[in-house]
Amino acid sequence: MTHLKGEARASYVRQMFGQIAPRYDLMNRLMTGGRDVAWRRIVVREAKVPRGGRLLDIATGTGDIVLEALRHDADLCAVGADFVFEMMLRGRDKPGAGRIRWTGADALALPFPNDTFDAVTSGFMLRNVIDVPRSLAEQWRVVKPGGRLVCLEISRPPRNLLLPLYRLYFHRVVPLVGQLVSGDRSAYTYLPQSADEFLSPDELADFMHQAGWRDVQYQRLMLGTVAIHSGVK
């Protein structure tokens, strides 16, 4: 789980997401009250891909971000990349998914040339990678000068009266619902643990700067439990 390091953790994450793939989208809707749909719209808007441009979505899962982007621009060259093939197989059955260029890829070694995409996006990915700086550097490498990175991520809320409720929900309710819906309690125990151990929004913004991204900004949503970061190459 979160105590695993390096390749052992990467292997665990790949296996875990493969197991929960059949109920992944349903659990996202339940856990967020459907708000994840609106968050992905913000991600697409902030990516600012030109008409007919190129978008790369890493850890694309079942392709929700690229499908949202294609709804706005059917001529988009949209690549959905993931190292969990079971997730992409689920996504390929969705309406419109035939326009996505599905690609097996590791976020730490993207199989694309330098300066290829107008934007790179991700949703709930960075807390799962074993080397955040390397992932951010790889995203910087494959984006064109002037292109953008936009990432959606779970965030620890500020210390206030809502923090105990956040912890109760994520550490007690989410694993129980995960067990009932997906049959896998351990996967939805990992989720709050990984969120607790992940970088704060300010820390992630610092890592983005160090990777070469400029004009780094973020916005917090859902009472501070979600953050959307953006940066420009």
Image (cartoon, helix red, strand yellow):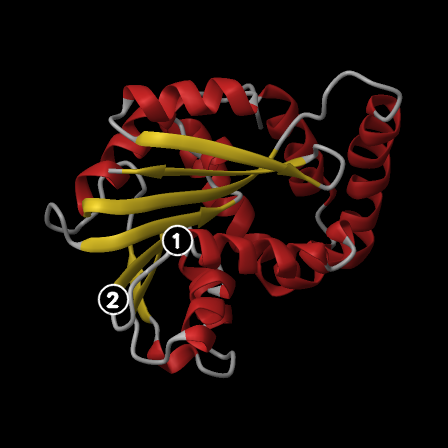
Tell me if I can see residue 15 in this picture.
Answer: yes
Name the element at disc 1.
helix
Give the position of the N terminus as an image quadrant: top right
Could you tell me which residue is drawn at 81 percent across and 27 percent down? 167
Give the position of the C terminus as an image quadrant: top left
Residue 228 percent coordinates (x, y): 53, 40
Residue 127 percent coordinates (x, y): 51, 32
| Residue at the spot of label 1 | 47
Q: Earlier in the sequence, mark 2 or mark 1?
A: 1
Q: Is residue 159 left or right of residue 198?
A: right
Res 200 quadrant in image:
top right
Residue 172 percent coordinates (x, y): 85, 34
| Residue at the spot of label 2 | 53
Q: Amino acid at mark 1?
A: Ala
Q: CA distance from mark 2 to mark 1?
A: 11 Å
Tell me if I can see residue 131 in this picture.
Answer: no
Compared to 147, does 53 lie above or below? below
Q: Amino acid at mark 2?
A: Gly
Residue 65 percent coordinates (x, y): 48, 61
Compared to 72, does 212 lie above or below? above
Could you tell me which residue is drawn at 78 percent across and 35 percent down? 170
Could you tell me which residue is drawn at 51 percent across and 54 percent down? 18
Res 225 quadrant in image:
top right
Could you tell me which residue is drawn at 40 percent across and 27 percent down? 130
Query: How many marks are shown on the rendered structure?
Result: 2
